[in-house]
Image (spheres, grey):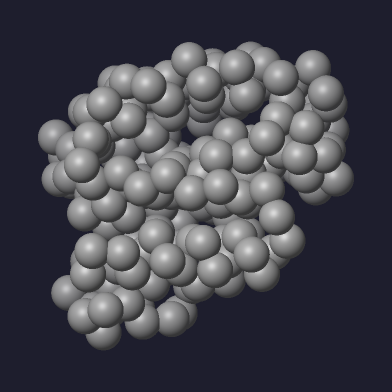
Amino acid sequence: MIFVIGPPGSGKGTLCSLVEGTQNWSGSAHRHLSVGDYLRTLCGQERPPESLLYNCDAIRTYIQHNKVIPGDLLVPIVQHKMTVTPNGFDADTMWLIDGLPHSLEQALAFDGLLGMPIKVIILECDPEIAKARFLLRGREPADDEERFYRRYDNYLQNLREIHQHYGKITKIIRVNGSREECLDAFLGALWEGQ
């Protein structure tokens, strides 16, 4: 598993989607799990059957108030998604998990339940570029400039502890350029050290 973290609008989902299905250094296929997208689907208007397994009201409240979802609530959801995905835990699958962890508490919960990732890629993006991307995509009606800055500030507050926790397995890349430039940097980070 590889964590891909960065501020809102940094391109985590875009980069992971572009790489999904390609093979890594060992021949394993990259699979992308956007934690945020999955939570929006799980707790949205048209809930899938597995939503009955979780407290979607609590999850929606955390999301609406830009609060970090506790690891003991979030990590079992991620584990379930990985488990029910065909070939999810096969040796031939390398998960790219975008949007997790948002806090040290989530990181510790994930490590305890599913083990440490093999790498953590941190996307650095200038706030104005990230804000423009965030507002352009407009995933939710409440996605405005104020919400962007709340989420961006929350990300920065938690990043140092996450970075320190994972230490040597982290790779920081800049993602301010074009899609092609960002993809080149992302691929370099994926392959580095392998």
Residue 123 horizontal/vertical position (percent):
51, 44
Q: Choose top left, top right, bottom left or bottom right for residue 40.
A: top right
Going 21% across and 54% down the picture, which residue do you hit? 118
Residue 115 horizontal/vertical position (percent):
15, 45
Q: Nearer the viewer, residue 35 or 28?
A: 28
Residue 8 horizontal/vertical position (percent):
64, 36
> Residue 138, can we see it?
no
Total count of labels: 0
Left/right placement of residue 135 relative to residue 59 reads right
Going 68% across and 48% down the picture, which residue do you hit? 176
Q: Reply above or below: 130 against 148.
A: below
Q: Choose top left, top right, bottom left or bottom right for residue 45.
A: top right
> Residue 189, can we see it?
yes
Q: Reply above or below: 32 against 98.
A: below
Residue 14 horizontal/vertical position (percent):
63, 59
Q: Choose top left, top right, bottom left or bottom right for residue 103.
A: top left
